[in-house]
Image (tube, rainbow, N blue to C red):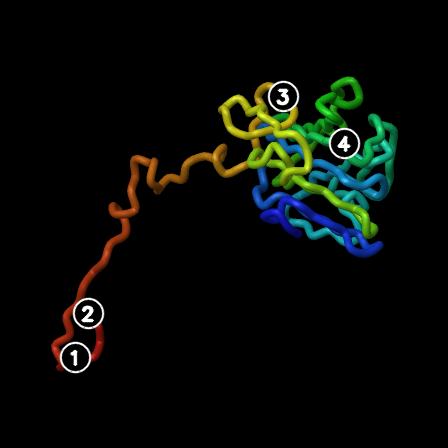
């Protein structure tokens, strides 16, 4: 991993997996991934509490868009969209309000806009998989529209004005980043402050009693 853990390079013929550090169970979310390989690649969503062995789409808890254009889950692929290769940007639009996921290739939604998978429920992360010494993915969750200087800079933001994407996120979808997360109940921007519930209490020792009171 490099570039702030946004880039993943495979080093052997084994499968390498990487996922977002933020998981979501509601809302609509968008991310982009730049590939620098031509074989053995998945863009995935998967349940956050599951750890994959081999590649995630081998399991029932993961759903993926394979480089040959197929959609995969539970170790089986079926017809879905266009194949992709070195230099292509794959977008993921994850709609956890309605339980759907859509994949994009270079800004074009695949399968004529029909969801790749439906009925999703739970807490999900977005990620990628690859194998082979030439496999490489670079992620953009809104922080770097150049994919670590691997291509021209993207300037498209989400509906909240957040993010630097190469392609415009679909309407209603937000960058999967901390800036779009809800404010905590207690925090700098909240009406409730930590000082209202937590404070220091001083005790002065007397030399006669070793136990703090």
Sequence-first disc among 3 and 4: 4
Residue 110 image point, x, y percent: 77, 23
- The residue depicted at 73 percent of the width and 28 percent of the height is 103
Label 1–label 4 contact, CB within 8 A: no
Cα–Cα span, label 3 and label 4: 18 Å
Is 139 in front, or is 188?
A: 139
In the picture, the disc for residue 213 is 2
From the image, tell me which residue sits under label 4: 88
Which label lies toward us, 4 or 2?
4
Discs 3, 2 touching: Cβ within 8 Å: no
* The C terminus, quarter of image: bottom left
Give the residue at x 75% y 27%.
105
Is 155 located above or below residue 143 in the figure? above
**In this rendering, position of residue 127 left or right of residue 55:** left
- Residue that numbered label 1 is attached to: 209
Residue 143 in the image: state x and y as whole percent: 55, 36
Q: Left of 46 or right of it: where is 37?
A: right
Q: Residues within 10 Å of mark 4 (few under 14, many from 20)?
A: some
Distance of label 1 from label 3 (alpha carbons): 67 Å
Q: Earlier in the sequence, mark 4 or mark 2?
A: 4
Numbered disc 2: secondary structure: loop
User: Between 65 and 105, which is closer to the camera in this rendering?
Assistant: 105
Disc number lying in front (1 or 3): 3
Helix, strand or loop at mark 1: loop
Q: Nearer the viewer, mark 3 or mark 2?
A: 3
């Amino acid at each position: 991993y490099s570039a702030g853990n946004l880039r993943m390079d495979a080093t052997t013929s084994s499968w390498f997996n990487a996922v977002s550090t933020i998981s979501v169970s509601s809302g609509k979310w968008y991310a982009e991934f730049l590939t620098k390989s031509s074989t053995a690649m998945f863009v995935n969503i998967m349940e956050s509490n599951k750890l994959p062995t081999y590649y995630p789409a081998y399991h029932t808890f993961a759903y993926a868009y394979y480089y040959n254009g197929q959609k995969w889950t539970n170790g089986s692929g079926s017809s879905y969209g266009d194949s992709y290769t070195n230099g292509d940007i794959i977008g993921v639009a994850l709609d956890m309000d309605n339980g759907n996921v859509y994949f994009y290739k270079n800004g074009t939604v695949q399968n004529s806009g029909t969801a790749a998978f439906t009925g999703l429920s739970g807490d999900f992360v977005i990620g990628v998989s690859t194998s082979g010494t030439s496999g490489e993915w670079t992620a953009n969750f809104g922080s770097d529209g150049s994919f670590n200087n691997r291509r021209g800079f993207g300037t498209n933001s989400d509906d909240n004005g957040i993010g630097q994407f190469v392609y415009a996120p679909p309407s209603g979808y937000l960058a999967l980043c901390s800036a779009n997360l809800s404010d905590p109940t207690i925090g700098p921007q909240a009406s409730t402050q930590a000082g209202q519930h937590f404070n220091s209490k001083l005790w002065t020792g007397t030399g006669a009693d070793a136990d703090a009171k």
